[in-house]
């Protein structure tokens, strides 16, 4: 994702299972990935939007809104 100020952000769009929390997911990813590979935004969705060909429809994914300098 690239915002209006031309800043790039890594965004994870997920369809979580019951009991899944962003904090646990972030902690788990930190065990395997370097810090710059951890998404800044995690967006939970009931399902991922698909094109008629069955691929993810990127145009239909919600745009993350940056509201502060601290993300949880």
Image (cartoon, grey):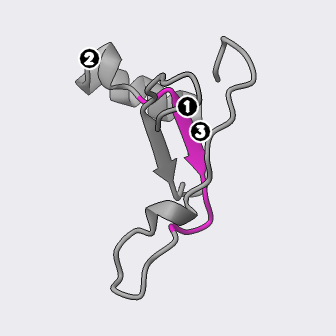
| Relative height, residue 5 to residue 12 (above, below) | above
| Relative height, residue 30 to residue 60 (above, below) | above
- Give residue 56's position: percent from left, percent from top: 40, 68
**Tag 1's secondary structure?**
loop
- For this orientation, the residue located farthest to the top is 69
Left-right relation of 28 to 45: left
The residue under label 1 is: 3
Q: Write the residue at 26% across / 24% down.
A: 33
- In this rendering, the label closer to the viewer, 2 or 1: 1
| Relative height, residue 23 to residue 21 (above, below) | above
Q: Write the residue at 46% across / 28% down.
A: 9
The residue under label 3 is: 21
Check if residue 45 falls in the magenta segment.
Answer: yes
Check if residue 43 falls in the magenta segment.
Answer: yes
- Look at the image and give the residue range highlighted in magenta: 39-48
Task: Give me the C-alpha separation between circle 1 and circle 3.
Answer: 26 Å
């Amino acid at each position: 994702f690239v915002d209006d100020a031309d800043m790039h952000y890594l965004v994870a769009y997920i369809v979580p299972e019951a009991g899944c929390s962003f904090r646990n997911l972030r902690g788990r990813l930190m065990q395997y990935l370097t810090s710059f590979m951890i998404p800044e935004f995690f967006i939970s969705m009931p399902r991922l939007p698909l094109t008629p060909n069955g691929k993810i429809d990127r145009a239909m994914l919600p745009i993350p809104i940056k509201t502060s300098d601290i993300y949880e």
